[in-house]
Amino acid sequence: MTQNSYRMVDVSGKAVTARRATAMGVIQLGPIAYPLVRERKLPKGDALALAEIIGIMAAKNAHQSIPLCHPLGLEHVAVSFDFNDAQGAVAVFCTAATSARTGVEMEALAGVNGALLALYDLAKNVDPVLRIGDIRLLEKQGGKSGHWRHPDGLPVGWSQPPSVEELA
């Protein structure tokens, strides 16, 4: 009988610290879908409002779709959007925060992916030429490694996401 090498990391010996992570991703929309998303006038409804809710739900439930991800009681999740008219694209930002023994990077990334997929689903019927990309962890804080920022920063054309304090 063989045994696989997959196991959840034991974090029981780590100290509980404040943890925060911000991730982002971009959906490139076509010339028909972009203004409808931005103006909240898609035939299926307000894609931004629904994407925000789905992003929060995805962050809260990251452990259910990522088998080795620790279930965390999140204390804060915020999803926000930035628009680039020249590119016809929307950036999604998700910040997750809690006090725990492990980080919240997966929760922030899951929130971004959930929100992006919601935008895709609601926009695909008006313009199926959509592209999701530039998904990345932008920043994380807390734990032994302290504060970390992605060395490439934001992709060209995007504003810094709002801080947790601005979203609260």
Image (cartoon, helix red, strand yellow):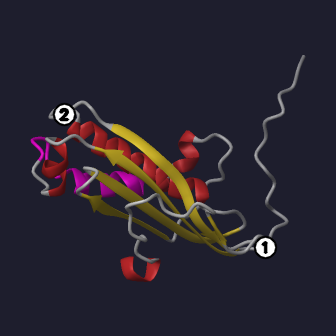
Q: What number is the disc on residue 127? A: 2
Instruction: Please tell me in which quadrant of the rendered image residue 4 appears.
Output: top right
Categorize mark 2 by other alpha carbons within 10 Å: few (<14), some (14-19), many (20+). some
Location of the C terminus by quadrant is bottom left
The residue lying at 79 percent from left, 60 percent from top is: 11
Q: How far apart are marks 1 and 2 (CA)?
A: 49 Å
Residue at the far top in the pictured view: 1
- Residue 81 horizontal side relative to residue 94, left or right: left
The residue lying at 14 percent from left, 34 percent from top is: 126
Q: Earlier in the sequence, mark 1 or mark 2?
A: 1
Q: What number is the disc on residue 15? A: 1
Magenta stretch contains residue 54: yes
Q: Depth check: 75 or 81 in front?
A: 81
- Residue 76 horizontal side relative to residue 149, left or right: left
* Main secondary-structure element of the magenta-colored stretch: helix
Categorize mark 1 by other alpha carbons within 10 Å: few (<14), some (14-19), many (20+). few
- Residue 94 horizontal side relative to residue 107, left or right: left
Q: What number is the disc on residue 149? A: none
Residue 161 can be seen in this image:
yes
x, y percent for residue 32: 13, 41
- Residue 159 horizontal side relative to residue 128, left or right: right
Hey, what amino acid is under mark 1? Ala
The magenta region covers 42-58
Magenta stretch contains residue 37: no
Foreground mark, 1 or 2?
Answer: 2
The residue lying at 35 percent from left, 51 percent from top is: 54
Decide: is 57 above or below 166: above
Q: Depth check: 82 or 15 in front?
A: 82
Element on which disc 1 rests = loop
